[in-house]
């Protein structure tokens, strides 16, 4: 799970329940976001809108497809 913040270390903008479930955050990287930037698993416009409106964006891990992970 990844958490995008509008401002570095702005954890006070997060709901209490989210922080409780998220645990101890660790800075992974800083990104300059703009409309032309591509993100691997998220829509840049959704991320930017959430940052503007909420101050954060939560990216959940992709769902695992069981048939791809069963092995032979």
Image (cartoon, rainbow, N blue to C red):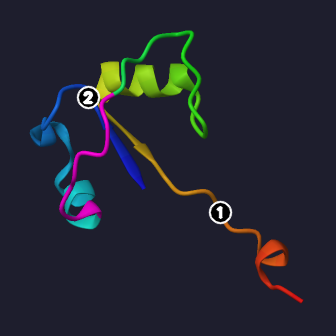
SS type, badge 1: loop
Query: What is the distance, in whole Å, between disc 1 and disc 2 at their CAs?
Result: 25 Å
Q: Which region of the structure is painted magenta?
A: 22-30
Quarter of the image for the C terminus: give it: bottom right
Magenta span main SS: loop
Residue named by callout 1: 63
Query: Where on the picture, by quarter, is residue 27?
Result: top left
Residue 59, horizontal then vertical, whole percent: 46, 46
Q: Does the stretch in magenta take in 27?
A: yes
Instruction: Depth check: give the residue in front, 31 or 61.
Output: 31
Residue 30, horizontal then vertical, whole percent: 30, 30
Q: Of label 1 and label 2, which has the lower sequence position? A: 2
Q: Mark 2 Cα within 10 Å, few/some/many (few <14, many 20+)?
A: some
Q: Which mark is residue 55?
A: 2
Query: From the viewer's perspective, is residue 6 above or below residue 11?
Result: above
Query: From the viewer's perspective, is residue 23 above or below residue 70?
Result: above
SS type, badge 2: loop
Residue 34, horizontal then vertical, whole percent: 46, 11
């Amino acid at each position: 799970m990844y958490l995008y913040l509008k401002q570095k270390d702005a954890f006070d903008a997060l709901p209490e329940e989210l922080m409780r479930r998220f645990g101890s955050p660790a800075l992974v990287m800083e990104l300059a976001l703009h409309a032309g930037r591509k993100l691997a698993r998220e829509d840049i416009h959704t991320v930017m809108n959430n940052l503007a409106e909420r101050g954060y964006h939560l990216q959940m891990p992709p769902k695992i497809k069981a048939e791809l992970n069963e092995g032979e």
